[in-house]
Amino acid sequence: MTMPDLFTPLKIGRLTLPNRIVMAPMTRNRAPETIANALMAEYYAQRASAGLIISEGSQISPTAVGYPATPGIHSPEQIAGWRLVTDAVHAKGGRIFLQLWHCGRISHPDLIAGAQPVSSSAVKPQTKVITWQGPKDAVTPHALSREEIATIVADYAQAAKNALAAGFDGVEIHAANGYLIDQFLRDGVNRRNDEYGGSVANRCRFLLQVTQAVVDAVGADRVGVRLSPWQPFNDMADSNPQALFCHAVEALNPFGLAYLHITEMGRENPGAAGPDFDPMEFRRRWKGLLITNAGYAKARAQAALASGLADAIAFGVPFIANPDLVERFRGNHPLNAADPRTFYTGGARGYLDYPTLNHGEDRADR
Ligand SMILES: Cc1cc2nc3c(=O)[nH]c(=O)nc-3n(C[C@H](O)[C@H](O)[C@H](O)COP(=O)(O)O)c2cc1C
């Protein structure tokens, strides 16, 4: 049997990806009214040769917001805005999932009409949050009641239905990077003593309830989950991430999801978010398709596929700077460098203007 490589097709749920080069979800703050728009449609369409595009995080409700100018998926106008994006990607032959996002305590009253941000527990993140006026100190969040948790679970299900109504091929539940679901998972934040806190099983309960609701809403073959076991970003840590995330992965198995998406972010700084461990632990436990991510270039991605660590690789920053990343990998062409100064600034610059091999200033490699 030949080992799969980046150009071996892959069946994910109802889709057949023509390659295993996935575009990682990336917030770009180009939706000033929280509504996806023509600018975004062009950006995603430029990247439609990806095996699968995972959209930037998109708010499931008006109080899920954590940053200025990020899109939502809870109003008719937002559904119509995203329809521009999905139509443009599909017209170019691409496939796109929407990332469902609730930021929890990584928010600010300025962003959510004066409301208090929410979390598993009333633990203030030791970090700044970004508002329209610039970075501000985070505030102490309100610890969600059981009734409020049930409402948010229902919001996830409705947002998933909205994503399908907007033409997405599926959804990814954002349970990574210190946002609301992760704030339930890890005991650096979660201090609850009800059925949502304490034991590893209890801390996984919110994730599993959200997953069940989203699966019931749109079908397991249209649902992926993203986890970040090593990620210290957003003031996150856990006393035993290996036990926690291995339990989460085994508890997700019975759903028969389209995929599990692990980001290895944080592994470059081992121990920052808790004791380090081997990512192969997930491959051993997870019975479905596995996407991995963070810091991959072509050679290491091919090695990860060959070793069986993952079935596909998600690329973030390389896709910002190289709309034709797939073509560049295929031909071993050099990559454009990304400019981090324009990641979050809004507008077309640093968004739509990275050159492709055929139309750019970078023809010297030919
Ligand atoms: C500008 C930017 C925005 C990001 N926004 C998100 C996001 O909305 N959701 C998410 O899960 N990860 C987000 N990430 C993390 C990326 O998905 C990815 O995990 C990270 O960039 C590491 O992969 P890379 O080394 O291939 O870039 C973001 C990263 C960048 C650079």
Image (tube, rainbow, N blue to C red):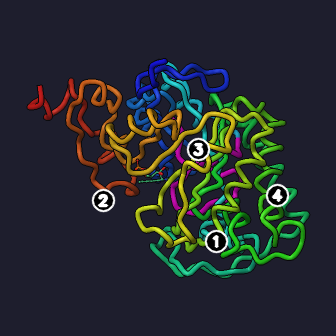
Q: CA distance from mark 4 to mark 3?
A: 19 Å
> Is residue 73 on the magenta stretch?
yes
Name the residue that disc number 2 marks. 341
Name the residue that disc number 4 marks. 205
Type of secondary structure dominating the magenta stretch: loop
Left or right for 51, reference 322: right
Q: CA distance from mark 1 to mark 4?
A: 16 Å
Q: CA distance from mark 2 to mark 4?
A: 38 Å
Q: Of residues 127 and 296, which is closer to you in this image?
A: 296
- Specify the segment rendered in magenta: 53-75
Q: Secondary structure at mark 1?
A: loop
Question: What residue type is disc 3 on?
Answer: His
For label 2, count other residues whose C-alpha is less than 10 Å away and answer few (under 14), some (14-19) or many (20+): few
Name the residue that disc number 1 marks. 238
- Residue located farthest toward the front when viewing the structure as drawn: 1
Q: Residue at x 84, y 61 (%)?
A: 149
Please identify, in this view, whether the residue under mark 3 or under mark 2 is nearer the observer: 3
Please identify, in this view, whether the residue under mark 2 or under mark 4 is nearer the observer: 4
Mark drawn on residue 225: none
Q: CA distance from mark 2 to mark 1?
A: 31 Å
Q: Residue at x 32, y 55 (%)?
A: 342
Residue 323 lies, with reference to residue 229, above or below; the image says above
Q: Of residues 140 and 328, which is closer to you in this image?
A: 328
Q: Earlier in the sequence, mark 3 or mark 1?
A: 1
Q: Secondary structure at mark 4?
A: helix
Q: Earlier in the sequence, mark 2 or mark 1?
A: 1
Name the residue that disc number 3 marks. 261
